[in-house]
Image (spheres, rainbow, N blue to C red):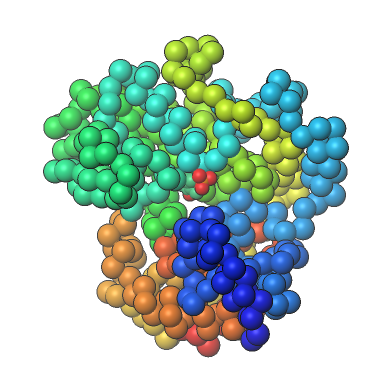
Amino acid sequence: MNRETSRDLYDRALDVLPGGVNSSVRAAPQPYPTFVSKGDAGHVVDADDNRYVDWVMGLGPLLLGHDVPDEVQAAIQRRTSEGPMYGMPTEIEVDHAEFIARHVPSVEMVRFVNSGTEATVSAVRLARGFTGRDKVIVMQGGYHGAQESTLVSGDREGASPSSPGIPQSFAEHTIPVPFNDEEAAKAAFEEHGDDVAAVLVEPILANKGIVEPNPGYHETLRALTREHGALLVFDEVITGFRVGGLQCAQGKFGVEPDLTTFGKVIGGGFPVGAVGGKTEIMQELTPAGDVFQAGTFSGHPVTMAAGLETLKYAAEEDVFDHVNALGERLRDGLRDIVEDQAPNYSVVGADSLFKVVFTRRGRQPRNGADVADAAVDRWNRVFRPQMLDEGVVLSQNQFESQFVSAAHTEEDVERTLEAYKDAL
Ligand SMILES: *Cc1c(COP(=O)(O)O)cnc(C)c1O
């Protein structure tokens, strides 16, 4: 397969973009990333005109795939032609917030921002402001964007920044615990209970292999936070309007957090984030309350139109049934292949998320450490490149989720399973 144009573009990019990209994970593919020229339904076409089945799907936002339905496209074009943004309020922001509040069990009010990172930054500040406490409990292997409070490594005994540029004193306020470990969460609250502002958790770890919660785990976090006067914050930036359909993962699991962060799907492919929750807490944000939060582009009319029309389309056209059924078909097919060819590997995922984690011990991962232990080199250097040669783009590293969209077909699924069969 000829990928010369991608190579030449990456060569140019390395001179003007650090690492040749604008977001780290995009540079993970060896020896250079595939540059995209355009999308088409469930496929992407690269700069050399090669066509691939695309399971990256923008790293999550593209619930409908690359072909934006007419009504979504019309709404985006109308908003763009009327002037892209104003710095004054518009009706579409109210419409979108009403849609989210109507469907997501724990959400009464919403503050829109411009990325998932900004959403988690705002949620942590709000939780600290509301409780008057500083500490946050996070999951090892959880991801909440490129933000100071959560880029930490370590455990309950001590955390340190996982990136240069973050003061050690910031990490002192963060307590990492293993996902699915109720005892660790209890111990963290026993030690620090009165100082904990929030537990911040992805309902499903979706940036470290896809790890589902053990039955009862979120209920335990809910009980502990309530007992100690801390907030439970679900980071639904990936799972929101993808896992559990319109109710999101909190509806699927039947656990109501105090705050929820959103991103990805709710912008219909445009930059977005949001924090949602009960009025009592949300009212603490400025200008209603005192916890400062603001953004020039927040509630951007084009993004709001794209996101709201996407969600309405999903609600009306049974999109979740379609993507979930294809997700299940992929996971079932992959389980058969893995059982035959790589019995130590684990097929993971839920609804429209799927992945094969190259685990070494043949058991389903229960936390971030189980996934971190995977055979990453085989994935990076042998498996993913072969899948690419077979015309299938998988997520850029072993840890990110892969996403089914409304535009994917049975045929895309069968082709993908055949490629896995060859490459595994
Ligand atoms: C992607 C992601 C973020 C960060 O969102 P950005 O829009 O990339 O800033 C935060 N939390 C989770 C769970 C995510 O998957």
Q: Residue at x 47, y 81 (%)?
A: 383
Left or right of 424: which side holds 316?
Answer: right
Q: Residue at x 57, y 64 (%)?
A: 13
> Which one is in front, 131 or 7?
7
Q: Residue at x 30, y 18 (%)?
A: 132
> Which one is in front, 169 or 278?
169
Left or right of 21: which side holds 36?
Answer: right
Residue 185 percent location from the top left of the image? 23, 40
> Which one is in front, 137 or 108?
137
Residue 152 percent location from the top left of the image? 29, 46
Number of labels in the image equals 0
The quarter of the rendered structure image containing the N terminus is bottom right
Residue 129, quarter of the rendered image: top left
Residue 379 percent location from the top left of the image? 42, 76
Left or right of 65: which side holds 418?
Answer: left
> Which one is in front, 296 or 409?
296
> Taking the image as drawn, is residue 393 in sight?
no
Residue 224, quarter of the rendered image: top left
> Up-down: is 189 above or below 358?
above
Residue 183, quarter of the rendered image: top left
Q: Residue at x 58, y 46 (%)?
A: 264
> Taking the image as drawn, is residue 295 in sight?
yes
Left or right of 359: which side holds 269?
Answer: right
